[in-house]
Amino acid sequence: MRKRKLLLYACLLGFAVLLSPFIWRKGVQWVYGRSIYTVEDVPAEKVAIVFGAAIYGNGRLSDILRDRMDTAVQLYQDGTVQKILVSGDNRFENYDEPTAMMDYAIGQGVAAEDIQPDFAGRRTYDTCYRAREIFQLESAILVTQRFHLSRALFTCQQLGIEAVGVASDPQLYRDAGWYEARETLATAVALWDVIQEQPAPVLGDPIPIE
């Protein structure tokens, strides 16, 4: 009987561990979903932060990244933001998300002096940490897809940025189910990141966005 009880408790514990990332993500979505707005009703801020995503070999933006940039450009053209921080991966010489994002925005009419590239936004945590420590932001509008936005809001707010978000979801994306599954694990990792404050983003001299 004792062994059966121990086995039952072990099974219940294992089940709870398996479920915990899903429960945590649902909680983050519920709490931070209240900070998500549309382009039309988001409160004005000085800076929009756009999170990087895949680009192709010729510098063309993936659909996901193009939609993020189109949303940020609209916020800029509407006068909701004055500056755009484009943050992405540039760890390899022939792969440069921020420059591709910046070129796209300029092509859509954004003044070059109103765009600040962040070449070390390799992860959501890095982008949020560097936005606060390098670019000296205390508040911002975060621009990304809804499946990613609650994690981005959680991370930035926990790192000291008063952030709200605008979801850039004008279309359905291929592999949407994979993105949702990935976010479940990534949201659990985000909790660990902000608790330990150990991940070391690439740092450098402060570049305040004026």
Image (cartoon, rainbow, N blue to C red):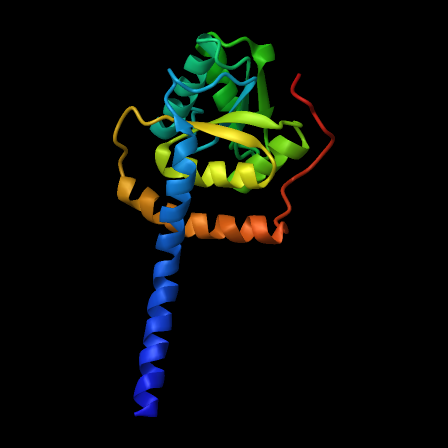
Question: Which quadrant of the figure has residue 91?
Answer: top right
Query: Which residue is rendered at x = 43% and y = 31% of the image?
Result: 35
Query: At which x and y percent is residue 123?
Result: 52, 41
Can you see residue 173? yes
**Residue at the location (62% across, 28% down)?**
138
Residue at the right extreme? Answer: 205
Residue pictured at 35% horizontal, 63% vertical:
18
In the rendered image, the quadrant that contains the C terminus is top right
Q: Indicate whether 3 appears above or below 79.
A: below
Q: Can residue 96 be seen in this view?
A: no
Which image quadrant for residue 112? top right
Q: In this view, does 183 lie above or below 203?
A: below
User: Residue 17: percent from the left, percent from the top?
Assistant: 39, 65
Quadrant location, the N terminus: bottom left
Residue 80: percent from left, percent from top: 48, 13
Image location (x, y in percent) of residue 134: 67, 31
Q: Which residue is drawn at 61% across and 36% down?
A: 160
197 is higher (above) or lower (below) than 35: below
